[in-house]
Image (cartoon, rainbow, N blue to C red):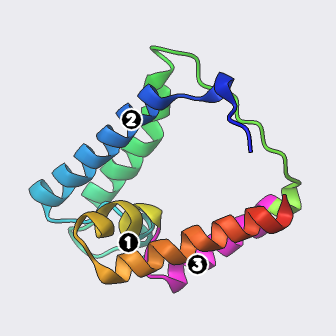
Amino acid sequence: MTLDWTHFTPWTSLAGGLLIGLAAAAFALLLGRIAGISGIVGGLLRPARGDIGWRLAFVAGLIAAPLAWRLFAAVPRPQVEASPLALIAAGLLVGFGTRYGSGCTSGHGVCGLSRLSPRSLLATLAFMGAGFLTVGVLR
């Protein structure tokens, strides 16, 4: 395995990780909520009274962040090396896994591990292992 030095970005990756950690901690401390994207968006699909505003604000922030980034730098163009059918299948599998695992990478991997949740550790090991295995088999 070789390292792609032209795309090696340790400082921006560290800054992004710190921002995600700070945002998840602030979300938990200020609102008492877990910043799990699947749970937040899922709550919009089954709205409860008085529970929609903060969820919409969170999703709006997810959409606004890359738009705001464009003010300071060029947005990188993603290069996808998969067919549309493979992307659809991958999206369905991720959705199924998120539902089956009762959470996503942000809920389990960021928030759950930081709270030392055994269930989140198991979930994170499972989805990371499945991802490594899938890439190993397909690539």
Q: Is residue 26 above or below residue 92?
A: above
Q: Is residue 100 above or below residue 21?
A: below
Instruction: Identify which amino acid the numbered label 1 is placed on.
Output: Gly
Q: Which residue is at the front of the view, 90 or 131?
A: 131
Mark sitting on residue 97? 3
Task: Please state if 14 lies on the left or on the right of 117 as rendered.
Answer: right
Determine the secondary structure under disc 3: helix
Q: Which residue is mark 1?
A: 43
Determine the secondary structure under disc 1: helix
Marks 2 and 3, the one that precedes in the sequence: 2
Q: Is residue 65 above or below residue 57?
A: above
Q: Residue at x 43, y 74 (%)?
A: 103
Q: Residue at x 68, y 74 (%)?
A: 93
Mark sitting on residue 14? 2
Question: Quick one: label 3, few (<14), some, or many (20+) residues within 10 Å?
Answer: some
Residue 18 appearing in the image: yes
x then y, percent, for residue 51: 25, 67
Q: Which residue is at the front of the view, 38 or 9?
A: 9
Q: Which residue is at the front of the view, 41 or 119?
A: 119
Instruction: Identify which amino acid the numbered label 2 is placed on.
Output: Leu
Q: Residue at x 78, y 69 (%)?
A: 89
The CA span between labels 2 and 1 is 30 Å
x then y, percent, for residue 126: 54, 78
Question: Quick one: label 2, few (<14), some, or many (20+) residues within 10 Å?
Answer: few
